[in-house]
Image (tube, helix red, strand yellow):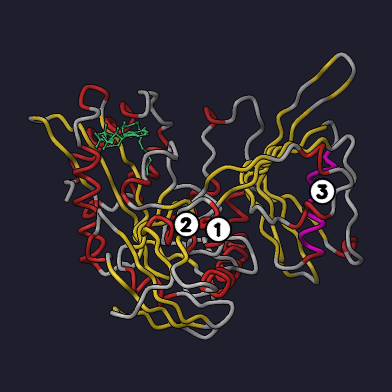
Amino acid sequence: MLRAAEWDHWYGQLEVAFGGVPEAPQERELWEALTERERSIGVWDGDVCVGTAGAFSFRLSVPGGALVPVAGVTMVGVVPTHRRRGILTSMMRRQLDDVFARGEPLAVLTASEPGIYGRFGYGIATRQLRARIDTDRVRLSVPDGTDDVALRLVAPQDASAACEAVYERLVPLRPGMLARRPGWERLPVLDPPGGRDGGSPLTCVLAERDGEVAGFALYSVKPDWEPAGPQGTVRLRHLGALDPVTYAALWRFLCGIDLTSTLQVGNRPVDDPWQHLVSDLRRCNLREQDGLHARLVDLPAALEARTYQVPVDVVLEVDDAFCPWNTGRWRLSGDTKGAACSRTDDAADLALSVRELGAAYLGGVSLASLAGAGLVRELRRGALAEASPAFGSAVAPWLPHGF
Ligand SMILES: CC(=O)SCCNC(=O)CCNC(=O)[C@H](O)C(C)(C)COP(=O)(O)OP(=O)(O)OC[C@H]1O[C@@H](n2cnc3c(N)ncnc32)[C@H](O)[C@@H]1OP(=O)(O)O
């Protein structure tokens, strides 16, 4: 338990671990308000904090649409004078024991570097799509009805409630999304002037159909004037839409803002539908990177919390060196309605580590692909072909924002 009076020093030491650039006061104030001090770990050398780690009590959408309690691991840092002597390892030990004791089936995080957390049993469960769309050259074909969508600009603070209502409806439709906790609605509209890098303040466009808000986009514009003419960039921060025509209207708007020639997209689902509307995908300069890392902490509870696309009945031989209570043989039986998972002495069908199970958990990474890398071993012929589609998801899992 971190005391309120310790937070400032504790967080300052986290900033030191991240290179020492202080955050803007608005940002710091928000993270202080969101910190769950009873879940915050500090490692102290005398009266100096040398290691920090925290967790948020989130609910995560999983295949099937359930919202599962998870620990959102955050604010991990070790100051440079104390690195590589096991402080992170000791914090991860303490934290995962706490998560298990609290009954949260999973822990999730976004990593500063993807190589850090695999050793603690985290697998890369979602990816995120980046793009730089050359809007001077790329044309968008939109579905019939797009012209019926009305767009209006609203100050982000004033639009927040409407955006949040749209977001809330989207959460159960895609695995990997986090239900909002009170206070977290401030994060999408956080906009400290020092973080704008020459761009405009954050802007919100609301999309309405028949007078009802059906979508929104939060973005800023960075102007740029070349001798040959304007070359501004639209930077998309967040977009949500409840139907295809609202979605298309928002993308058409973002691609068509005067005096701009680039739409920069930082974090979208890998299967984001705009990719099927554009005339030239090459000029969208797509890139993918890891998003949410997931760790099964209570293995049977986690596997029972999601559903399976096709009926599956499989025995998994799981290795979990860091949380040995998960090690062993588990029978998983499930379908689109639910699942049961319990220990068994029956012969195993597939062998894998808890890290691979974390990677496959949200349906974005197939067991077959992991098997191709030698990370899942098929012990009964045909088991992979049965289990791999069952673990899939119709839409790619995606984490819309960091934490
Ligand atoms: C969820 C989040 O908050 S992500 C943010 C993570 N924080 C940062 O990136 C801030 C800058 N970095 C740091 O603060 C530290 O270097 C940390 C937290 C990443 C590591 O802390 P340390 O106390 O040095 O780690 P620790 O000594 O316990 O190392 C454990 C193992 O992880 C390895 N490791 C540590 N950091 C890294 C890294 N950045 N990349 C790859 N491996 C790493 C170590 O080599 C060690 O491996 P070993 O068990 O094979 O010997």
The residue under label 1 is: 365
Report the Cα–Cα distance between label 2 and label 3.
35 Å
In the rendered image, residue 300, in percent from the top left (x then y), is placed at: 34, 74
Q: Is residue 312 left or right of residue 351?
A: right
Question: In the displayed structure, would residue 375 be above or below residue 344?
Answer: above
- The amino acid marked with disc number 2 is Ala
In the rendered image, residue 242, in percent from the top left (x then y), is placed at: 70, 67
In the rendered image, residue 184, in percent from the top left (x then y), is placed at: 45, 55
Q: Are marks 3 and 1 in contact (CB under 8 Å)?
A: no
In the image, 177 versus 228, the foreground residue is 177
Q: Looking at the rendered structure, which numbered label has been put on residue 359?
A: 2
In the image, 359 versus 91, the foreground residue is 359
Q: Give the mark nearer the N terminus: 2 vs 3.
A: 3
| Residue depicted at x 21% and y 50% | 93
The residue under label 3 is: 253
Report the Cα–Cα distance between label 1 and label 2.
6 Å
Residue 63 visible in image: no
Residue 24 visible in image: yes
| Residue depicted at x 31% and y 26% | 16
Residue 46 appears in which quarter of the rendering?
top left
Q: Are marks 1 and 2 in contact (CB under 8 Å)?
A: yes
Q: Give the mark nearer the N terminus: 1 vs 2.
A: 2
| Residue depicted at x 18% and y 47% | 2
- The amino acid marked with disc number 3 is Phe
